[in-house]
Structures are given as structure tokens and as C-alpha cells.
Amino acid sequence: EVQLVESGGGLVKPGVSLRVSCAASGFTFSTYNMIWVRQAPGMGLEWIALITGDSSIISYGDSVKGRFTISRDNAKNSLFLQMSSLRVEDTAVYYCARDGGCSGGNCYGTIDYWGQGTQVTVSS
Amino acid sequence: DIVMTQTPLSSPVTLGQPASISCRSSQSLVHSDGNTYLSWLHQRPGQPPRLLIYKISNRFSGVPDRFSGSGAGTDFTLKISRVEAEDVGFYYCAQATHSPWTFGQGTKVEIK
């Protein structure tokens, strides 16, 4: 069973840094692209970062580019999001998610599994 | 960025009756590989989203066959043939053809 468990969220002040983590299990982690998506209170979903299985390609949404860093440790089946210079508008639930990739010649082209999310609140 | 526009934003439905949600993209979602990476997600209150439909019309593992997707190019539709109580919540369309991936603003389905 695919499981994604986020941790590391909390209440922080504007301008500080925070790292959230995601522990993956139930699949061969290193063969999947991984994604962070966030959801502000009462709002929709925002894709913020993607990292390929071998970390060779990384991309960010414009709202976090230059402030957030996505990384992974395939030996520990873990995904990370280092967030710096946090702003009030970064307040959201942060979801770790798996890019479904391809299986047997069939490519999903979407997120197939989501974690439960970790709350990050930025407030003075 | 590709803008995904859903209609309606709210859909009160009667149990056992059909429901339909539309999603329009600001550009064609046909990828250079020939696939159209348009998916539909369902999010119940307090829960993470879960995948329902991928590549316009393919139901994900375990998704009931009362859910169906259709469309092409820039216009897509999710249909629920007979709404059940567990179907309440928000529905999002999502595109992964163009970077960055983007989502619709969500449609709230509730029981009348």
C-alpha cells in the first residue's frame, strides 16, 4: 500500500525558515517523480515543486521560486521541502504527492497518491 | 500558466440523481506525445484529494463506474451518473500537459 506521511509543519513567524518532510513507503520511491502541492485555508490547490526520481530535474512554481528548495533522499525514501523567507501567504496545508508515472506502457500524467498533509502557519 | 475554469462552482444535487461538472482550459491540453493529461480529483472535507479520472476518461483503481470523464482539447466534463452521499465535497480538474501543473478552482457538490 502506497503511503505518504508528511511531518515538520507548525506555526512560525514571517521571515523564518522551516523544513517539511515526507516519508514514503509501499513503492519503489527512487523510480517516481515527487511533488509538493499546497492548499491555503478555504482555497484550491497549488502545485509548487517537482523533483524527478534521480533528482536530475527540479522545477518550481513562480510563487516559491528562489525561496523554497525541494530535495529527496532515495536511500531513506524521503522527500523534503526547505522553505525560507516565509510569508503570511505561505500559510497552507502542504501535501506530498506522487507523480503516477508510467506502468506497462500506460502513463498516468497526474498525481495518483497524496499524503494527509502538514499544516504550515506563518503569522506574527 | 494554464488557467483551468470550472463550472458550476456549486452544485446542489439530489441523492440518486446525476451531476455534471465542466472544466475549460485556457490552452489545448494535447501534449506533444499525443496524450491529453487532464484529470479529476475529489476532496472530502478534512481529507486530501484523491484521484478519480486520468487522461480525460480513465477511472483510477477502485473508482466506482458511476464516475465518467469526457472531452477533448480545451473542454472537459466529469459526470456522476447517480450521486451517493459519499460523493459530497470538492471536485477539481487538473492539467499536467504544461508546466506548471495547474488546477481548477473547485466545484462544491452537496446534497439538497
Image: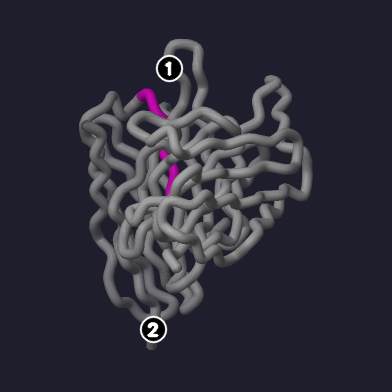
Q: Residue at x 60, y 50 (%)?
A: B102
- Name the residue beneath numbered marker 1: A103
The reply to whether residue A55 is in sight is: no
Taking the image as shown, residue B30 lies to the left or right of residue A96, namely right
Of badges 2 and 1, the one in the foreground is 1
Residue A25 image-quadrant placement: top left
Above or below: residue A91 compared with residue B16: below
Q: Earlier in the sequence, mark 2 or mark 1?
A: 1
Q: Is residue B16 left or right of residue B27?
A: left
- Chain of the residue that carries numbered disc 1 in the rendered image: A
Task: Name the one closer to the observer, A14 or B75.
Answer: B75
> Which label belongs to residue B27?
none
Query: Does the stretch in magenta take in B47?
Result: no
Q: Position of residue A121 (x, y in %)?
A: 36, 75
Which of B88 and A48 lies nearest the eye of the viewer?
B88
Q: Are marks 2 and 1 on the same chain?
A: yes
Asked which secondary structure carries label 2, the reply is loop
- Quadrant where the image shows the C terminus of chain B: bottom left
Residue carrying label 2: A123
Report whether B105 appears left or right of A10. right
The residue stretch that appears in magenta? A31-36
Q: Residue at x 34, y 48 (%)?
A: A80
Amino acid type of the residue that numbered disc 1 sits on in the rendered structure:
Ser
Q: Residue at x 50, y 48 (%)?
A: A49
Q: Secondary structure at mark 1?
A: strand
